[in-house]
Image (cartoon, rainbow, N blue to C red):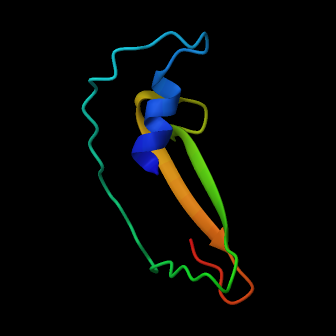
Amino acid sequence: MAVEALMQIAVPLDGESADLDIPVVLRQVHLPKALQLTDEEPVELYTELRPHPISSVNASDTWWEFQISSVSDATPCT
């Protein structure tokens, strides 16, 4: 999901094809809990991609933060 989000922001808004031969490096990946999906219970996923903060007022032009959160009736996961 993180790589797909990066590819979506790499494509210009005018829809023109872009050079997508971009290396992607995932660092500091943290999976606190596995999300188990079943056909019986619906799960809502929230995805967020934002520039990595450098300070309280500046953000990186190169590094991005990506977060997937889920909500179900049973247990919330982040």
View extreme (bottom): residue: 74
- Residue occupying the point 44% across, 77% down: 32
Residue occupying the point 61% across, 81% down: 39
Is residue 4 or residue 23 the one in the foreground?
Answer: 4
Q: Can residue 54 be seen at all in this image of the molecule? A: no
Judge whether 3 appears above or below 44 on screen.
above
Quarter residue 23 falls in: top left
Image quarter for residue 14? top right
Q: How many marks?
A: 0
Image location of residue 10, percent across then percent down? 46, 24
User: Given the current orientation, which residue lies at the most extreme right position?
Assistant: 73
Residue 8, position as x, y percentages in the image: 51, 31
- x, y percentage for residue 47? 60, 53
Q: Is residue 1 left or right of residue 45?
A: left
Residue 67 in the figure: left or right of residue 2:
right
Q: Which one is nearer the viewer's eye here, 49 or 63?
A: 49
Please tell me whether residue 6 is drawn above or below residue 29 in the rendered image: above
Residue 66 left/right relative to 23: right
> What residue is shown at x 28% (from left), y 26% (from top)?
22
Quadrant where the image shows the C terminus: bottom right
Q: Is residue 13 visible?
A: yes
Q: Residue furthest front?
A: 39
Q: Nearer the viewer, residue 55 or 43?
A: 43
Work out whether 27 lies above or below 38. above
- The answer to whether 34 is drawn above or below residue 68 in the figure is below
In-front residue for pair 71/60 = 71
